[in-house]
Amino acid sequence: MSNTTKADLLMVLVTLLAAVSWIFSKEAVMQMPPLLFMGIRFLMAGALLALVGWRMMRRLTLDQCKRAVMVGLVFGIAMSFWVTGLHRGTHVGEGAFLTSLAVVLVPVIGTLVFRETPPSSTWLALPVAVAGLALLSLEHGFRPEAGQLYFVLAAAIFALYFSMNTQAANTQTLTTRDGAVQQREKVPVLALTAMVLLTVGVFTGALSLVLEPWAPTFERVSLELAGWVVASAVIGTAARFFVQTWAQSLSNHSHGVVILVIEPIWVALFAAAWFGETMSLQQLGGCALIFTALLVNRWGAVRKLLKTWL
């Protein structure tokens, strides 16, 4: 089995772990402050991976540490917006489709930040995605919910995180101003994942300390709440992001992002089964347009993937 095929299969597993994590997280934030939940969740997950990969982390260079922390800070900002959207939003399935806009925005961020040249499909996908977003936010006139806005902001920053994470997980060839070629060593998968998760935990925990009350949560901790937090930390965070970073390290190609478009479909199905959520025709239309935009955006990779699988 080639590394590319392994990466694709691992990405499918990532979508399932991510979708289940939405359910765990929603249950948890209904019983505790969202940023506090994120701090505990990511510190637990990061500590678990750091315990396993401590020897590897000790061998990291200063440059590798800086890159991992920078990825973690960007991811921490994105997760702060995401969990606030989950806390304030009214529809988990819809939120998953809004967050998946990050897939469309990855090449846009690559153009603006990393001077990459996006495929023409990106510019075809953007208006389709905007149309889907409009259907979701204009159901009752132009009055988008606060949760929707947080999900869209999270999607934009997730796109930046995904690009930075891929670069950190792979060896890079850089050309200096004087024309010299340098190799920038990749950050080992386990060490990168542990440092990113710990950075997110510290960032969201500090943010929670400033913005949220902690006493009520710790005064009424239940076994149910502890179970949701532990499941989210171990299954939805440590396992999910280790597998995702591992998959990204196996291939420099970006078509792994294509497989992530499956995630909102899993989330919508799980939310319907667990929370009894339903969607209006307009919501279904908006989600369908966003999903179409995801496929259009990565059509070249989708076509190659289908040829490989079929």
Image (cartoon, grey):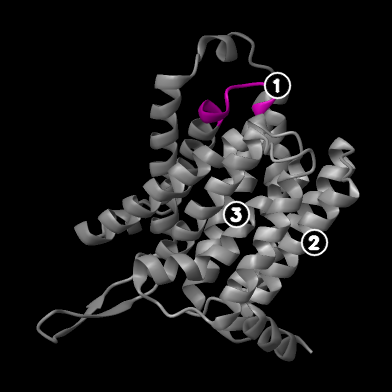
Sequence order check, earlier mark of 1 and 3: 1
- Mark 2 or 1: the one toward you: 2
In the rendered image, the quadrant that contains the N terminus is bottom right
- Disc 3 crowd, CA 10 A, few/some/many (<14, 14-19, 20+): many
Amino acid beneath label 3: Arg
Q: Which type of secondary structure does the marked residue at label 3 adopt?
A: helix
| Residue behind mark 2 | 288
**Residue at horizontal 67%, vertical 39%?**
144
Amino acid beneath label 1: Leu
Q: Compare residues 181 and 43 and report the one nearer the observer.
A: 181
Q: Position of residue 297 (x, y in %)?
A: 63, 74
Q: Which type of secondary structure does the marked residue at label 2 adopt?
A: helix
Q: Position of residue 118 (x, y in %)?
A: 49, 78
Relative height, residue 76 to residue 188 (above, below): above
Cα separation between marks 1 and 3:
23 Å
Q: Compare residues 283 and 31 and report the one nearer the observer.
A: 283
Relative height, residue 85 to residue 128 (above, below): above
Q: Position of residue 43 (x, y in %)?
A: 46, 37
Which mark is on residue 223?
1
Proximity of marks 2 and 1: CB atoms separated by less than 8 Å? no
| Residue behind mark 3 | 240
